[in-house]
Image (cartoon, rainbow, N blue to C red):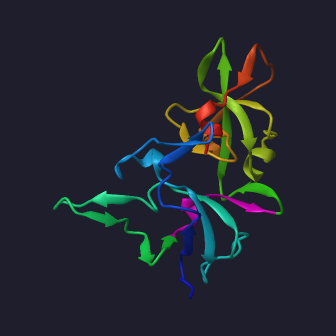
């Protein structure tokens, strides 16, 4: 089973991540299908598109767009699957909806995506500034590599929890500056990111 233009993927686990464990106790943190923050974003590739050449392979773990597995209420108030639903537990995804893939024990950003770790200064999250965690070839050509402190465009804080770490997903052209010095800033990772 293969698609010409799209990946076929399936969620790893449930469609939503509505529960966390705290001190060996399960806590329900969401009971609505409406909030995109609780939609699962981890998937496994079932098949790759026939028409595209891609480094992503069948069986790879991928980080995907939050609306792929999401359910909606239609105009009649009925709960329905996203337009990407195929059948059973399978979904379609275009290449731009796959942000990162896992191969050879490491995460690799797909296409022009990168991931940035938020920064704290004086116990406050610094807006539009972070540490590049996962870069790509376009950033490397500009001598911006993982570990560099960078500035990014406003409203690019699309949150993902990857390996129990809060990260922002963005495109390379969202990064606007590389800072050459560090002050009293530290990486920010909230406790709730570590409890999944």
Q: How many marks?
A: 0
Residue 54, quarter of picture = bottom right
From this viewpoint, which residue is outermost toward the front?
A: 24
Residue 6: image location, x then y, percent: 53, 75
Looking at the image, which is closer to me, 113 or 32?
32
Residue 195 lies in what quarter of the image?
top right
Q: Residue at x 43, y 69 (%)?
A: 84
| Residue 51 vertical position relative to residue 75 in the rendered view, above or below | below
Residue that appears at 63% across and 14% down? 123
Residue at 66% over, 20% down: 120
Q: Left or right? Give the position of 9 relative to 30.
A: right
Q: Main secondary structure of the magenta part?
A: strand
Percent across and percent down for residue 104 are: 83, 63
**Whether residue 8 is situated above or below residue 72 in the rendered picture:** below
Q: Which quadrant does the C terminus fall into?
A: top right
Q: Is residue 177 left or right of residue 34?
A: right
* Quadrant containing the N terminus in the rendered view: bottom right
**In front: 86, or 5?**
86
Residue 111 shown left or right of residue 182 in the figure: left
Instruction: Tell me which segment is drawn in magenta.
Output: 93-103
- Residue 119, image x, y percentages: 67, 25
Work out whether 37 lies above or below 93: above
Instruction: Look at the image and say whether residue 75 sits in the magenta stretch.
Output: no
């Amino acid at each position: 089973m293969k698609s010409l233009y799209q990946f076929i993927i399936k969620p790893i686990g449930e469609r939503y991540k509505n529960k966390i464990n705290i001190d060996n106790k399960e806590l329900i943190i969401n009971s609505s299908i409406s909030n995109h923050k609780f939609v699962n974003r981890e998937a496994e590739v079932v098949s790759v598109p026939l028409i595209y050449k891609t480094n992503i392979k069948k069986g790879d773990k991928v980080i995907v767009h939050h609306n792929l597995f999401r359910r909606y209420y239609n105009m009649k108030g009925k709960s329905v699957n996203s337009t990407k639903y195929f059948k059973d537990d399978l979904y379609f995804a275009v290449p731009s909806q796959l942000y990162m893939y896992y191969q050879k024990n490491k995460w690799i950003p797909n296409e022009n995506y990168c991931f940035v770790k938020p920064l704290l200064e004086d116990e406050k999250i610094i807006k539009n500034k972070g540490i590049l965690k996962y870069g790509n070839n376009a950033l490397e050509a500009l001598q911006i590599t993982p570990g560099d402190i960078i500035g990014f465009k406003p409203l690019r804080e699309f949150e993902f929890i990857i390996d129990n770490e809060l990260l922002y997903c963005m495109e390379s052209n969202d990064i606007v500056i590389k800072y050459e010095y560090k002050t009293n800033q530290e990486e920010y990772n909230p406790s709730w990111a570590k409890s999944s």
